[in-house]
Image: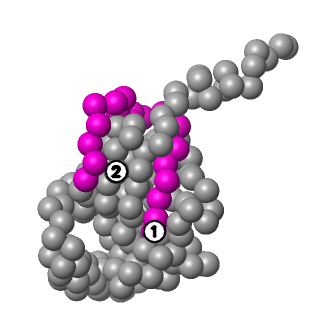
Amino acid sequence: MLVKKLLYITILTFLVVSCKSNGEQTEIKDPYSKVKAEKQEETIQINKDMLDVNRDIVEKYIARHNWEMIETESGLLYMIYAKTNDIEVKSGDIVEFSFKTSLLNGDVLYDSDATGNRKMTIDRNQEESGLNEGLKLMKKGEKAYFILQPHLAFGVAGDSYKIPPYSVLVYDIEVVDIKSPESEFSDYGEVVL
């Protein structure tokens, strides 16, 4: 009986000491976690402040051009200014489009007249989520303006070529063609294995 009590006290003491030492380790990590959380909050606030500044500039840009834009939940602003009753863009489609990409100050960065049309597989492109989202709102032959905040375009880094960091981009888009992935592959003829 004495042995059982002694064993019980030893195990209980071991558990209490273990719990205390784990608590001390948590306290050592806590200052880092607290600083990290504070820095994340700071970064979130800076991004919110920047979006507020951008929103004011974008609203003035829209008013100056007399556009009636619609805003999606993500913050994409769009206006389809030439509508059709043709086929709709859907997930997985390969969309060919002509485009002009510019900054709010009017500087044209990219233009399909110079580079040729682009093709994008819908919901497979992670680079410009706002462009992907906007194309899904369109039909073949339609033309639209998109305004993409940095988080919907090239973000903090820009594209390391023409698009500066934190840029709000204006796209003038025309959907030229829509193909399903199956029809795109059928253009290459029958594959023989």
Mark 2 crowdedness (10 Å alpha carbons): few <14, some 14-19, many ≥20: many
What residue range appears in magenta? 81-101
Asked where in the image residue 173 lies, by quadrant, the reply is: bottom left
Asked where in the image residue 37 lies, by quadrant, the reply is: bottom left
Q: In which quadrant is the N terminus drawn?
A: top left
Q: What is the distance, in whole Å, between disc 1 and disc 2 at their CAs?
A: 14 Å
Q: Is residue 18 visible?
A: no
Asked where in the image residue 27 lies, by quadrant, the reply is: bottom left
Query: Which residue is farthest right?
Result: 193
Q: Is residue 163 left or right of residue 61?
A: right
Q: Position of residue 186 (x, y in %)?
A: 67, 21
> At numbered mark 2, what does the secondary structure look like: helix, strand or loop?
strand
What amino acid is found at the position of numbered circle 2 in the picture? Lys
What amino acid is found at the position of numbered circle 1 in the picture? Thr
Q: Which residue is mark 1?
A: 101
Q: Position of residue 39 (x, y in %)?
A: 35, 85
Q: Is residue 143 magenta?
A: no
Q: Which residue is mark 2?
A: 143
> At numbered mark 1, what does the secondary structure look like: helix, strand or loop?
strand
Mark 1 crowdedness (10 Å alpha carbons): few <14, some 14-19, many ≥20: many
Q: Is residue 122 above or below residue 157?
A: above
